[in-house]
Image: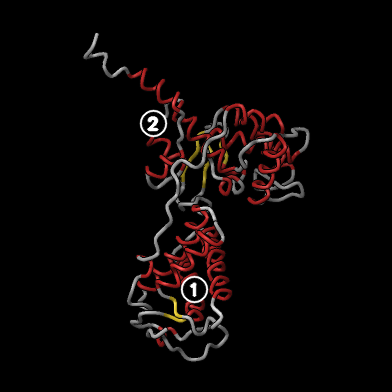
Amino acid sequence: MGKKTLKIPSIDSHRLNMQTVRGKNDTMIANEFFLLHEKFIQDKVLEGLASTTINGHKENFKYFKKYINEEYQSGADCIAIDSEVLKGYVYYMLQEKQFKPCTINVRLRTLRCYLKWLYDEEYLNYNYAMKLKLVRVPEDTIKPLSDKDVKKMLNATDKTSYSGYRDYVMMVLMLDCGVRVGEAVNIKVEDVDLKAGLINIKGENAKTRVFRQLPISPKTCRLLSDLLAIAEENNCEYVFQSTYGGKIKKQNIILSFARLGEKVGLKVRCTPHIYRHTFATNAVKGGIDPFTLQRILGHTTMAMTRKYVQLESSDLVNKHSKIDLLNKYLR
């Protein structure tokens, strides 16, 4: 492509001679770009990133590798990774595959993180992450479930079976405190304090790697006490179990929610994440202050919390009328 590329010695068992590779370079051929990602992952593990985050980096990078190998006939040993290649990847996802903006941005964020690492570690003299822009996402795309739909879901669970009752309690817990599904499946018996009405989310299980406590209502405590008894009876340390015993997988909960949503005829795809949005919106309607909500949700910024709150026009009218801002001016 007429651009400066990086030459490295032969690779022995996928091990790179980092002293030879490291240097100021404008571009990097794809094969080297792929192999250095292993070093990037090692560094991120040492930084203490959550396993789910590490797996996300690995999974999303596979999509980029697949794109390069399929789109460029010259091969990964010839193509140089530069702005044009990266823009082509975005165009491919947006126009050819027509992925949703949120899906595209998830893949781009991990790729941007890797590109910045290459620049920071001086493998490249240009930070291509600056050129790789996220695609615009329509505001307020995720709507909370209506009260009617929530009741449909809760009533449709088979509470006579363990799996049905487990899913029911999971839904109630999410509606009560907005816990992430990845955090919920990792809740252990020791993490639940029924007397205090608190659930401890350990740092290693939190998306942000920060410990926090979630307040739960007496109704949720009563439901959780049943699952705690079952867990102790089965000698299982996790509150939410699979039907075969042991910790339930996150993907199984997601699939269970989706199937139940189809069963009751919801017009939207029902996911645990929607329950988190529903909690946030209901909490604001109930009068919770934004800073408390941010802490419960475990967000690092208020901007992120804002995206979880979707108020209807009627809610805005009601709140505005209660304040009556003009009362002190006009009688």
Q: Label 2 neighbourhood size at 10 Å, few (<14), some (14-19), many (20+)?
A: few
Residue 97 pos. (x, y %): 56, 60
- The residue most toward the bottom is 9
Residue labelled with disc 1: 37
Closer-to-camera residue (136/276): 136
- Residue 316 falls in which quadrant of the image? top left
The CA span between labels 2 and 1 is: 42 Å
Q: Residue 257, labelled with which disc?
A: none
Identify the secondary structure beneath mark 2. loop
Q: Residue 289, labelled with which disc?
A: 2
Mark 2 against mark 1, which lies toward the viewer?
Answer: 1
Whichever of callouts 2 and 1 sits on the residue coming sooner in the sequence is 1
Q: Label 1 neighbourhood size at 10 Å, few (<14), some (14-19), many (20+)?
A: some
Identify the secondary structure beneath mark 1. helix
Q: Give the answer, above or below, for where 129 lies relative to 187.
A: below
Residue drawn 60% across the image and 31% down it: 220
Residue 209 pos. (x, y %): 46, 53
Residue drawn 63% across the image and 29% down it: 222
Residue 17 pos. (x, y %): 46, 86
- The residue most toward the left is 329
Residue 252 pos. (x, y %): 68, 49
The reply to whether callout 2 and callout 1 are in contact (CB within 8 Å) is no
Q: Give the answer, above or below, for where 149 lies relative to 248.
A: above
On screen, residue 299 versus residue 328, left or right, reads right
- Residue 5 falls in which quadrant of the image? bottom left
On screen, residue 311 versus residue 69, left or right, reads left
Residue drawn 47% across the image and 30% down it: 283
Residue drawn 56% across the image and 68% down it: 62
- Name which residue type carries label 2: Asp
* Quadrant of the rendering where the N terminus is positioned: bottom left
- Name which residue type carries label 1: His
